[in-house]
Structures are given as structure tokens and as C-alpha cells.
Image (spheres, rainbow, N blue to C red):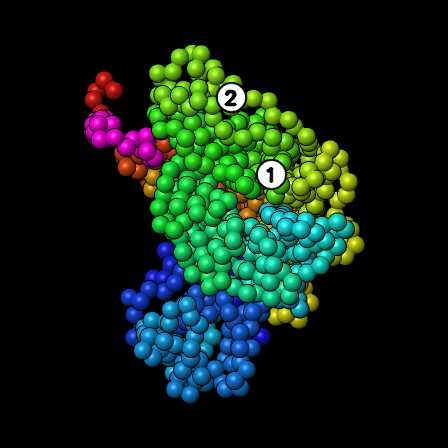
Amino acid sequence: MIDISLVTLSKQSPRSPFPHLAVAGLFFFSALGSPPSSAADEPDAGNVSFHDDVLPILRTNCFGCHQGAKQLGEYVMTDFDALIRGGESGDAAIVPGDADSSYLVSLITSHDGVAEMPKSPRKPLHETEVETIRKWIEQGASNDSPETSGPRFDADHPPVYAGPPTLPSIDLSPDEQTLAIAGYHEICLLDANSGEMQTRLVGISPRINSVRFSPDGSRIAAAGGTPGELGELQIWNASTGELELSRQVTYDTITGLSWSPDGSKIAIGANDNTVRALDAASGEQVLFQGAHEDWIRDTVFTPDGKHLVSVARDMTCKLTEVETERFIDNVTSITPGALSGGLSSVAMHPSRDEIVVGGADGVTKVYRVFRQTKRQIGDDANLIRNLPRLNGRIRQVVVNSAGTHLAAVATIDGHSELRVWKYDFTGELTDELKAILGKRVANRSAEEKKKVDESVNQTTTQTVHFELPEAAAYSLELTNDGSIFVAANDGQIRCLDATGKLVRTFHAVPQSGAEGSEPSGSTAPGGLRHSAKGEGPLGTDRELDFSSTAKTDDLPSESPVNLSELVELSVVPESILLTSPYDYVQLVAIGKLRDGSTVDVTRQITVSKSDAFASLPGGLIRPRGNSVGEVTVSFGSHQHTLPLEITGQNEFAVDFIRDVNPVLSRLGCNQGTCRRSTKRQERISIVAARLRSHLRHPSPDG
């Protein structure tokens, strides 16, 4: 049995802007797709490749309804044998050498713009895509995909964890009885009181970044995908465990999932700097917003569902009107210094148009969503309250469903801090404060500035302060009685009462074997275990070893490899070319063991030293000066030599578009409404032109 959902794209194709090396797939163990094929991409006149030409079409258009978790028509297309065999009709889906007799071809061929597959409202395949599949079948329907690596998972063969995984997201059901956990390839549903496993919802995406119950608790949505390949939105029936919808979007994993208050829409954030909302029933896109300049980390709807708030790494919090898809305003100030880093989380008050945000600067802030005064240069007029700074980067902020408490959790260097405050204040402004905020900051008196400062920095009642000294916490939930669930990178769920007392701790996912036992097989990054024996769903080596990462934050540890078992070391890329000071190369080192299994050893290799380049931990190479030579990568007695060429380090000219404009964007100088007036734009254009001219033709005196 060949599971084609686990095959990684092995080369750059016209359907994708990203090159994908097969060995790089060892980081993720499966690659579930490529960007949608373009109607303009004509199939090759010669042989049609299943892996390069057909599989991307199936992944984008078919896998959502024909996978292990959702077998529409009893037809599974993620397994090659089942793809050929067909479904409940009994007809052969694919007859090698005979496209006209292949039932699949008749289903995907449109007549008057209508086809049996994909089902409405999805559009039929383009005629060039149908022709590509026909040619592949006529040429024998052979499978030229690389051999899959790693185990495959489904409801009957869920992942087996040999150690604690990192838990990126948890969510509590509206009745506060069920806790949803983001796992590897799955969502685990636990009894919130006992911690006992209730249901495991296993899908095709290895990475699950966000999980959220629908407002009525009947459905569970998950946002994730395959890193560097595509994102997937899943919607599950919370009662039956049935996958109701699988929609693949963008070229990377998605995150920042939120439901509209009526449960009709789902918003997601993407790494292509876009915010999208999809119809929760059909999966069709109903909103697209591209106003951000960096990855979107979180989204939330206003209580009436008419507006959507999104936060991103670009240090902005943006407001979008849902019906018109129109970007309305920056909720937070875009003035340099107002926010000291990217934003990672946003939460909405359940009944008022107020949001809580947190990010890299460790400060939890409460804002009004809509302006009550005209925007002025340098203002932060929507700010309601600054809360005490947490030690580290805030990973998540939450407001309980009663709107009585808010909380935040932050992490730095494997140490985490959690705080809960009473939400007993509102964003109402007095007439005096409105008048002050209506002035430009530079025109306010010292006394007026003091009054604004006192207003936003009032003392807020703190109810809980809890520290996790050796765990990186990424997600939390807050109940209506003030108790807390917090999830960390040690695989544990900690439950605190309203006073901050730890009342119980339980494993988020099932554990395998006795504590301290060493599973067989080899370990890859993050402890994921794959073996030459584990082929297909009945393979014997299906364990995933998530080595404890309690003392690391974003850099997971690796289990040491027995050097006596290592028979071969390979490194990609095969050569290094760096042509500017901004260039860098990430080495990937893969070891082959005696039993035929492979293991990533990138973080365990030794890289030769040189004045021409800097070698950072984890195999990252950055240039220091022009050079031609070699880089030697060593692991035990095994060595690998790579040709090295570094140019462009001495004659590098500063460019306004490439070098200066990104700095201006990061500081907020060229975005938002504070640069809207014509006169200001003219002045900025003149300054920019002079700066560009100076940088390209500097004067002798500098």
C-alpha cells in the first residue's frame, strides 16, 4: 500500500514558487500538496509524471473529500492502490492505458460547465488539468513518486507518542466540559474535568496550529497544514467525529483561527501576509484582506460579526469590514514605539467592541475597536489599558466567555509566566479625555499628557500570577469561574483554580511504553520517529518520539545518534553560493543508519571555521567576506565537503527599495492613515527621493 499523501515534492514546478528538496521532507514526514495549478500551464507533450503533474491536481482539488478521515463515495485518493481501484460504484476509477474506460475521467470531465467531481460549489477542473490526467492514464498510469518516508495515520492507526509533544493550541468547549488539543496529525478531545481522552480526530495535516469550537459547540475547526507546502482548514462534527470539511489554501500552514459569532464563517491568518474568511459550510472564500506586511498570527470577529480584527508580525492590528472586505483602520497606533514588536494574539470581549492584544514586547494591552476621536499624528487614542509587562514574548491572550477576566501567557528561554486580571473596566471616554485625544500629541499640554497616561495605566486587579520555570507555555484557556488551563512544550495540561493554585496536571496525548524506555528506530527533528520497517498502516514502527524540550523554547532538542550505527552522511545543498551580505544558507544533514532508516543530524554536526563565513548553531551559514574555498561538515568519523563561493561583500551598494524602504515599513513610516494628506505625502516623497539619491551617489563628506 502506497500512501501518496506522504510524498514530498522533489523539484520546483511551474505550479509552485518554492523549490522542494525530497530530503527536506524529512523535517515534516509528509507533504500534502502544492499550490493550485494554473489553467495556463499546458501539460508536457511527452511523458506525464504522476508525481510532478497529476498529484498536485489531486491534492488541491480532491484530497479534501477523499481521504482516510472523509471517504466520500467510499473513494480514498490519498492511497495509490485505492486511487486506482475506485469507490462504492464498483467501477474501476482508473484503467491503465484506457482513459475512456476510467470512471474517474468521466467524473471530472465537465459538460456545459458542470462536472460530477469536484462537488459544487467547487469549480470543475480546467480542461488542461483533465487532459493531463487523461494522458497519464493513457501512458499506463504509473506511480513515479519517491518512496514515502514515515508512518501514515488514520482513525484506526492514530499517532503513538513516545514522549511529550509541544502543544501549540487548546480550546475549551462552550459548556466548559471538553478540551480540544492540537496534536500531531490530530485533534485530541479530553474531558476537561478528568483529563481522560474522549475522541481522537486524525487528519492528513501533520501540523495543527489552531483549534476552536464553534460558538454552539457542535463543530470543531482546525487550522494547520504542511510547512512550506500548503495550509488546510478542517471542520469536524464534535459529536460524531466526522470530518465535515477539508479546504486547502495557500502555500504554507495557516493559523489564527476564529469563528464568526453566528458560526457561519471562519477566519484564518496566513504566512503570505493575507487574512481570509471562509464559509463554514462550503469552504468558499468570502473575505480576502492583504493590508498586512508580515505573517498574520491571529484573528477575531467583533460581537456582531460585521468586522474582523487581525494581528500580525508587522506590529499592526487591522480592522476589516466583512461584507465589503474593505480595510478600515489600524486599531492600534502605528507610531514607532507604541508597539515594540510583532503581535501574536488577539481576543475580543464577548459583548463590547474591545480587544486584548499581546506580542513580542510582553505587554498586554486593551483597545477600543472603533475610534471615538479623529486620528492624530502620534496618537494611540484607542488604547484603554496597559497591563503589567510579562517576562518574555506573549504567546496568547484570552477573555473568558463571561467577560469578567482576561489572561496572558508569555515565554522566554524555556521559562513561562501567566497572569490573570479582572476585566472590571470599560473603554468609555469622558468628555475631557475625548477633547484631549482629539488634539495632536505635540499640541497637548504636560497636564493633558499626564491625564492620558494616568487613564491608560490605571491599576488593574490581578487575580493569578503563576510561573512555569522549566516549560515553554504556548496556549491557555480561561473558564467563567476564573480557573485556567495552560498547555506547554512538555506535553502537559495544567489546571489552576481561580486563586492560581495548581489543582491537577494530565497528559494531553496518550503516552507509549514505560517512562524512561527507549523506543526502537531512529529519531528525526522534534523527536518524530520513522523507520524502514514502518511501511503502510500496519507497519510495526509507528512511534513518534517527541523528546522533552522543557529547557528550550523554539529550538527542539534531538536524541544523540549512536555513531557506530551511522553508515552514511549526506548534506544539502551540494554547494554554497552567497552573493550579497543578506544571503545565507541552511544546511540539512541526514544520516543513514545500518537498519536503513534515516535521521536528521543537522543540529549535531560540526562545521569548519573560516574568516570568510559565520557558522551558526543548527547549520546556518552567513557570509563575512569574499572567498572561494570549501566547507567541511563533520559528524563523528563521517565528513562531507561542499564547494563554497562568496562574492559581492566588498562592492555592496545600498539600495533604497531593497535596504531602506523595509526599515521605513517596519517603523510604520509609510503605512496607515497618518500619512494620508497630500502635503505630507509630497514632503515624504521629496525626502525619500533625496535619501535615495544620497544613498546611490553619496557626497565625499558623507
Q: Residue at x 64, y 26 (%)?
A: 461
Rendered position, 673 above or below 445: below
Rendered position, 624 above or below 8: above
- Would you call the spot at circle 1 few (<14 residues within 10 Å), some (14-19), or many (20 or more)? some
The amino acid marked with disc number 1 is: Gly
Q: Main secondary structure of the magenta part?
A: helix
Q: Which residue is mark 1?
A: 403
Q: Quadrant of the N terminus?
A: bottom right
Toward the front, the furthest residue is 431
* Extent of the magenta region: 669-694
Q: Which residue is mark 2?
A: 455
The amino acid marked with disc number 2 is: Ser
Q: Quadrant of the C terminus?
A: top left
**Disc 1 element:** loop
Toward the right, the furthest residue is 514
In the image shown, does 370 or 508 lie closer to the viewer?
Answer: 370
Query: Residue 501 appears at what percent x and percent y?
Result: 75, 35
In the image shown, does 454 or 614 lie closer to the viewer?
Answer: 454
Q: Residue at x 38, y 69 (%)?
A: 123
Of pointers 2 and 1, the one earlier in the residue sequence: 1
- Answer whether residue 684 is magenta in the image: yes
Q: Is residue 134 left or right of residue 301?
A: left
Rendered position, 32 above or below 270: below
Tell me, yes or no, if residue 604 can be seen here: no
